[in-house]
Amino acid sequence: MGFNVTCSPGKDATAGLVMVTPELPTLILYLDPVNLAIQLPAFPDGAQVLTRFCRELSREAARVADAIDGGER
């Protein structure tokens, strides 16, 4: 499935892990007021694809945060 979207997080935006079932971890982006769920792809090696994506997302999100606040922690 493909789609493009541009959005800005609201004041109460957050992200989290939701276990839909014990075998189905899901990344949820609560963007305030819109939510986006990213689940395991339903094809062979889907778990590895989602794992790679989440690690890349984590790295790139850290880079965006550093660009915004100058690397302050």
Image: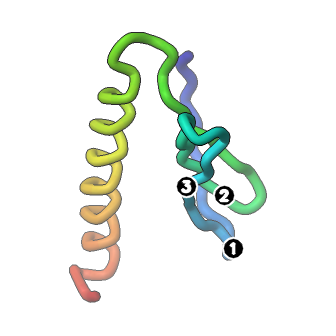
Q: Quadrant of residue 12?
A: bottom right
Seen in the picture, residue 57 relative to 61 is either above or below; the reply is: above
Looking at the image, is mark 2 or mark 3 earlier in the sequence?
3
- Left or right of 3? Residue 20 is right
Task: State the separation of the CA atoms marked 3 and 1.
Answer: 17 Å
Colour pattern of the rendering = rainbow
| Amino acid, disc 2 | Tyr
Q: Residue at x 38, y 28 (%)?
A: 47
* Residue situated in front as seen by the camera: 69 or 31: 31
Secondary structure beneath dot 2 equals strand
Q: Mark 1 = which residue? A: 12
Q: Quadrant of the C terminus?
A: bottom left
> Contact, CB < 8 Å: mark 2 with mark 1?
yes
Seen in the picture, residue 9 relative to 38 is either above or below; the reply is: below
Q: Mark 3 = which residue? A: 17
Q: Quadrant of residue 46?
A: top left
Q: Mark 2 = which residue? A: 30
> Contact, CB < 8 Å: mark 2 with mark 3?
no
Q: Quadrant of the N terminus?
A: top right
Dot 3 crowding, Cα within 10 Å, few <14, some 14–19, many 20+ = few
| Amino acid, disc 1 | Asp
Dot 2 crowding, Cα within 10 Å, few <14, some 14–19, many 20+ = some
Task: State the separation of the CA atoms marked 2 and 1.
Answer: 8 Å
Dot 1 crowding, Cα within 10 Å, few <14, some 14–19, many 20+ = few
